[in-house]
Each structure stands twice: as structure tokens, then as C-alpha cells.
């Protein structure tokens, strides 16, 4: 009886507490099916390779992406770091788009722990569908020629969808051409596919095809897919064996972590199909925002579940807007700048979007009158 009551309470939490929380898709609560699977998960010592739930998740992920091997990791940051450690040597260089997660939001791990220099390349700044995209020509011209002065360029990191560019999606052709540019110069290619399922759903292509020419990739279980913890790193068996050693080195050798993988398995089985809803809601939000006085938004960048816009025209910072929205129960992340990100996820429905838009309109009216 008590268990039934607490499950009902969880369900209520799912439905209400996060339905106006647009800060990130990382805030999604595990589903009831995940909680059940976690409770019943068969587990073993994963450092011995004996956790059946982890082994099942890794096998399934490898199958989805057509890669030889997979490794369950604690986070996308850990997966990205392990991809670098396993495919480069200290002193080498890694090319990444200037605003990429790996170059900005991973605590400088590539430099601190990998001894790597990141070579940032500024992606297309003209907005629209091309926002944040680097070209194969840019990659080729950034690769260092053999010269006694230069560090060796070892790897190209590609982010798809591109979070800081508004969730823009690199197409299959764009992915193929970037990988070809890198491979033809002897570089490895790592795909930071934290939201690769959003990209695949947005394009209507198989995730396997999108990641086909990436040597390694990571994807997050804990964002739009709603699992509580974890990411998966995929690649050739030899690279994943190496990554497994480095994961142990940095303290990521987990034991009965099958309780987490069990939720991750549900995430890949059931979480992908509903991402299209998130994209539709992000679109609805973006189109509504475009009609709010003082908000400037480039609708062509809204291709997945992320909506980026600017509130300078409202005379507000994102922090000021966040404070105003808080009074309406709507949560966004705020700071000193005027750029705002809102993210659609499993707890955001159409009514949430409409409520947030009403709040925006009322804040806009107030800021015009003051
Ligand atoms: C979220 C995210 C990651 C990984 O983040 P963690 O919080 O470490 O799981 C990596 N790359 C991108 C583009 C992301 O959005």
C-alpha cells in the first residue's frame, strides 16, 4: 500500500513540478517504467564485466549505432573526455567549433587530463539553418601541416545537435563531408551526440546513418530520453577497451550500476519516439516568441527541442527575464547577457508553452510601459 502511495506521489511530481521548467531537458524525471526497471534490475560487478543490465544496454546501444562496442559512462562529459584520451596523445590538437560543449563546458578536461590543445573554429555566424556549422574547408585549413613548429592535429570533434547554436542539426551530407575532410588528413572523428537522437528525429533518418563516419560518439541518456543518469560512448572495440581503462583511471569504474543502465535501456527503447513532440512544442514556443514585442528570434535555428532568442529589445537581461517569469511560475536560466535558451522536454506540454508565452507577453507589456 505504501509503495502505491509513493508511486502516485511521484507521478504527481512528474506532472506538475516540472511542467513550467524550461531550463533544460536534463531536469526530466525518470518515468514510472524506469523506476520499476531500476527496482527489478539484475546487477553484478561491472568492473568484472558481470553486470547483465549494463551489458544489455551497451549491446543495444552498439546495435542502434552499428558500432563494434559501447561503454556506459557517468555523463556526456566523461564520455567525451574518454573519447579524447583514447584516440589522442598529450601535446596534440583537437579541432572543435568555438561554442561547442567540449570546448566550453567540460571544465577544460581535454587540457588538464588529456594534455590537449583545443583549436576552436568559429562556425557560421550568419544565423539561419547554418548557424554554428563549420565547413569541411574550414576543417582542412585548420589542420596543421607537418612542420617542426606545430603540434599534430589529431581529432575533429563534431556536435550534433549544436546546443549553443540553437539546437541546429547537421545533415547526413554535412556529417559525411566533415568526417571525410578529417579522415583524409589522418584525423579521428568524435561525434558529441549528446542529443543525436533529436538530430535523427529532426531529419527523419536512422541515428546509425548520421553517425556512420564518426569513429566514436557519445549520446546522453539523461536529457530528452529522461533517464536519471548516464551516457554511452561508442566506437571500435580497441578504442572502447582503452576508454574502459581510462574510465577506471578517472574513478568511473562503477560496480552494480545496472540499476542505472536498466533505466537507460528503457530510455533508448521508449524515449526516442516521443522526441518529435518536444520538437513540435519548441516550434510552437518559438513561433509564439516571434510575436512578442522586444523579442528577437531566428526561427530557422529552431530545428529540435532548443529555442534560443534575445531579449535586448525588451530592455532586459536573461536574468531579468528569469526573475519576471518566476512570478508566473515559469523557470528559465538567467544571467547578465541578453541571450536566452528554453528547452522543451517530456514535462512540457502545449499548455505549458502557452502559459509561458502569456507570461512573456505580460512581461513585454510591463517593460514597454516602464
Ligand atoms: C549535455 C551535453 C553534454 C554532456 O553533459 P553532461 O552534463 O556531462 O552529461 C555534452 N555535449 C553537449 C552538446 C551537451 O549538451
Image (tube, rainbow, N blue to C red):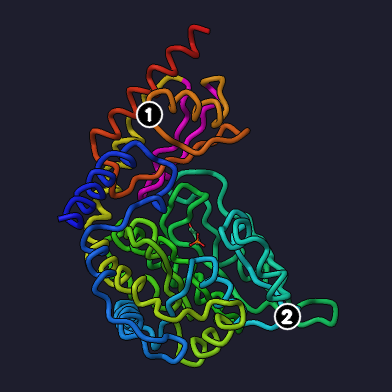
Q: Is residue 186 visible?
A: yes
Which residue is rendered at x = 23% and y = 43% of the image?
12
Q: Viewer-nearest of labels 1 and 2?
A: 1
Task: Choose between 263 and 217: the one closer to the eye.
Answer: 263
In space, the residues marked 1 and 2 are separated at their CA atoms by 48 Å
Query: Against 174, is 240 above or below?
Result: below
Task: Choose between 264 and 13: the one closer to the eye.
Answer: 13
Which residue is rendered at x = 50% and y = 49% of the image?
165
Where residue 229 sits in the image (x, y, percent)?
41, 64
Where residue 91 sits in the image (x, y, percent)?
76, 78
Where residue 242 sits in the image (x, y, percent)?
55, 89
> Is 225 within the magenta?
no
> Is 300 within the magenta?
yes
Looking at the image, is mark 1 or mark 2 earlier in the sequence? 2
Counting other residues with Cα less than 10 Å from the Cα at mark 1, is it few (<14), some (14-19), or many (20 or more)?
some
Which residue is rendered at x = 19% and y = 49% of the image?
8
Residue labelled with disc 2? 90
Q: Can residue 209 be seen in this view?
A: no
Counting other residues with Cα less than 10 Å from the Cα at mark 2, is it few (<14), some (14-19), or many (20 or more)?
some
Left/right placement of residue 45 relative to residue 1 reads right
Q: In the orientation shown, which residue stands out farthest toward the right?
A: 149
Which residue is rendered at x = 65% and y = 60% of the image?
107
Query: Against 243, is 130 above or below?
Result: above
Residue labelled with disc 1? 329
Give the extent of the magenta segment.
294-313
Query: Against 112, is 306 above or below?
Result: above
**SS type, badge 1:** loop
Is mark 1 in CB contact (under 8 Å) with mark 2?
Answer: no
Amino acid at each position: 500500500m505504501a509503495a502505491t502511495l509513493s508511486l502516485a506521489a511521484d507521478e504527481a511530481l512528474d506532472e506538475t513540478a516540472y511542467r513550467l521548467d524550461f531550463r533544460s531537458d536534463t531536469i526530466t524525471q525518470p518515468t514510472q517504467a524506469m523506476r520499476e526497471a531500476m527496482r527489478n534490475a539484475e546487477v553484478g560487478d561491472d568492473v568484472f564485466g558481470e553486470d547483465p543490465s549494463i551489458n544489455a544496454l551497451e549491446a543495444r546501444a552498439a546495435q542502434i549505432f552499428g558500432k563494434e562496442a559501447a561503454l556506459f559512462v557517468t555523463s556526456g562529459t566523461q564520455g567525451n573526455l574518454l573519447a579524447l584520451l583514447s584516440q589522442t596523445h598529450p601535446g596534440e590538437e583537437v579541432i572543435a567549433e568555438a561554442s561547442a560543449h567540449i570546448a566550453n563546458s567540460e571544465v577544460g578536461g581535454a587540457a588538464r587530463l588529456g594534455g590537449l590543445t583545443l583549436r576552436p573554429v568559429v562556425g557560421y555566424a550568419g544565423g539561419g539553418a547554418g548557424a554554428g556549422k563549420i565547413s569541411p574547408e574550414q576543417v582542412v585549413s585548420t589542420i596543421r601541416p607537418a612542420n617542426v613548429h606545430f603540434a599534430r592535429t589529431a581529432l575533429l570533434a563534431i556536435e550534433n545537435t549544436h546546443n549553443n547554436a540553437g539546437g541546429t542539426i547537421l545533415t547526413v551530407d554535412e556529417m559525411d563531408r566533415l568526417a571525410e575532410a578529417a579522415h583524409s588528413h589522418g584525423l579521428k572523428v568524435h561525434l558529441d551526440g549528446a542529443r543525436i537522437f533529436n538530430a535523427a528525429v529532426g531529419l527523419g533518418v536512422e541515428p546509425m546513418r548520421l553517425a556512420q563516419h564518426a569513429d566514436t560518439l557519445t549520446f546522453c541518456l539523461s536529457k530528452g530520453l529522461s533517464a536519471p543518469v548516464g551516457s554511452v560512448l561508442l566506437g571500435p572495440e580497441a578504442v572502447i577497451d582503452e576508454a574502459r581503462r581510462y574510465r577506471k583511471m578517472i574513478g568511473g569504474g562503477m560496480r552494480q550500476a545496472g540499476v542505472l543502465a536498466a533505466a537507460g535501456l528503457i530510455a533508448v527503447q521508449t524515449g526516442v519516439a516521443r522526441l518529435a513532440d518536444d520538437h513540435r512544442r519548441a516550434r510552437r514556443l518559438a513561433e509564439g516568441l516571434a510575436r512578442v514585442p522586444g523579442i528577437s528570434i531566428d526561427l530557422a535555428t529552431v530545428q529540435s527541442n532548443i529555442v534560443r532568442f534575445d531579449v535586448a529589445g525588451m530592455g532586459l537581461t536573461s536574468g531579468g527575464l528569469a526573475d519576471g517569469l518566476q512570478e508566473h511560475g515559469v523557470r528559465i536560466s538567467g544571467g547578465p547577457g541578453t541571450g536566452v535558451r528554453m528547452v522543451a522536454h517530456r514535462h512540457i506540454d502545449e499548455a505549458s508553452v502557452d502559459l509561458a508565452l502569456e507570461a512573456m507577453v505580460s512581461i513585454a507589456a510591463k517593460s514597454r510601459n516602464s
